[in-house]
Image: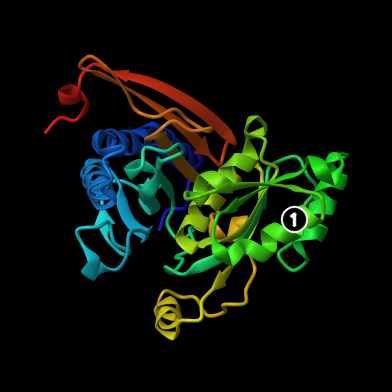
């Protein structure tokens, strides 16, 4: 059997580079599809519109794709389910993690930071995370490895980050999902002198805020969805940030499904590279306006989209502000 040559390796990289821009069309179309439902109060309809558009566009890509993070199990179709095969089957074998609409409540209520998100990676490099909760901690780039850790107290992590930044603890801002389960965490952060920014939904965006100094978010803490944790880890893999996650579940049925997906140890502390390793492409398009990207906008028949595109192999981050001439041309049959 022939060995891999330098020419073959270059070809593989070229394929990945070409795929990078192709992936943006997937999130753009999902965002435009659900945007007419912003503020309409119908979460299910908005989510379904995004799912349908994302599936349709994925199946146009020349990839041999497998969904490892999706909307649920096979019997929950027509959502994009875990294990679903997508693409033409003619291209590279890739794993796909996606959230067709991160922030269904945000969209239904017309609130900021609703996104469409997809990560595409080399086969076998994305954690096949079960639909359980995950305890998370994340910070942006530029810090020594290991300065924050799930196994120490929130106040210790707060002081460690403040020391690394050479600022007072009072200048550290922690993003946390506004949930009753986080009452003690919020109280400890504030008692230690830190600040808290609460979000009602969308913890992928919450983690990604740590990668952009303009958001004013220094750290993310708390318990959110495990699938969303993998997508967030993909973003940190491209930006050089740090993240740890640990699965959380008291439900035996969930744990049994997790075992079938290859999860053997619920006490394991995952680093970002364990959740999203290899060459990962991440595309994030705004549905509503947010701190990372702008939302979908109309200009007569034309439509504008705003996308953040990241690739871990190169560490490249692109912001794509695109004007599409018309919905018909943008979304052909």
Q: Please say whether residue 294 is visible from this viewpoint.
A: yes
Judge by depth and name the residue closer to the eye, 40 or 280. Answer: 40
Q: Quadrant of the C terminus?
A: top left
Q: Is residue 55 left or right of residue 219?
A: left
Judge by depth and name the residue closer to the eye, 19 or 307. Answer: 307
Q: Please say whether residue 148 is visible from this viewpoint.
A: no
The percent position of residue 269, horizontal first and vertical second, equals 65, 69
The percent position of residue 130, horizontal first and vertical second, equals 43, 69
Q: Is residue 259 left or right of residue 74?
A: right
The percent position of residue 303, horizontal first and vertical second, equals 28, 21
Q: Which quadrant of the structure image shows residue 258?
A: bottom left
Q: Quadrant of the N terminus?
A: bottom left
Residue depicted at 23% across the width and 16% down the height: 325
The residue tagged 1 is 189
Mark 1 secondary-structure assignment: helix
Judge by depth and name the residue closer to the eye, 89 or 220. Answer: 220
């Amino acid at each position: 059997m022939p060995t891999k040559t330098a020419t073959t390796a270059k070809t593989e990289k070229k394929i990945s580079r070409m795929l990078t821009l192709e992936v943006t069309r997937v999130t753009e179309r999902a965002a435009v599809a659900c945007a007419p439902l912003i503020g309409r109060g119908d979460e299910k309809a908005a989510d379904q519109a995004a799912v349908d558009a994302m599936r349709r566009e994925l199946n146009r890509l020349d990839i041999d794709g497998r969904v490892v993070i999706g909307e649920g199990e096979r019997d929950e179709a027509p959502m994009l389910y875990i294990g679903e095969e997508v693409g033409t089957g003619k291209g590279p074998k890739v794993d796909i993690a996606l959230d067709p609409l991160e922030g269904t409540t945000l969209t239904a209520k017309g609130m900021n930071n609703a996104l469409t998100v997809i990560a595409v990676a080399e086969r076998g490099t994305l954690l096949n995370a079960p639909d359980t909760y995950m305890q998370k901690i994340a910070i942006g780039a530029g810090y020594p490895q290991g300065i924050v850790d799930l196994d120490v107290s929130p106040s210790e992590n707060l002081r460690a980050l403040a020391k690394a930044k050479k600022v007072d603890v009072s200048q550290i801002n922690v993003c946390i999902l506004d949930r009753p389960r986080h009452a003690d965490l919020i109280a400890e952060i504030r008692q230690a002198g830190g600040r808290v920014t609460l979000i009602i939904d969308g913890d992928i965006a919450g983690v990604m805020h740590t990668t952009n100094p303009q958001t004013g978010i220094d750290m993310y803490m708390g318990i959110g969805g495990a699938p969303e944790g993998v997508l967030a880890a993909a973003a940190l893999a491209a930006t050089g940030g740090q993240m740890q996650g640990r699965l959380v579940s008291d439900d035996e049925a969930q744990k049994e499904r997790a075992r079938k997906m290859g999860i053997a140890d619920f006490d394991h502390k995952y680093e970002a590279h364990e959740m999203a390793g290899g060459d990962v492409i991440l595309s994030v398009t705004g549905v509503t306006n947010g701190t990372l990207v702008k939302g979908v906008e109309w200009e007569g028949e034309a439509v504008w989209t705003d996308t953040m595109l990241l690739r871990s192999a190169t560490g490249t981050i692109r912001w794509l502000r695109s004007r599409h001439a018309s919905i018909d041309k943008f979304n052909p049959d």
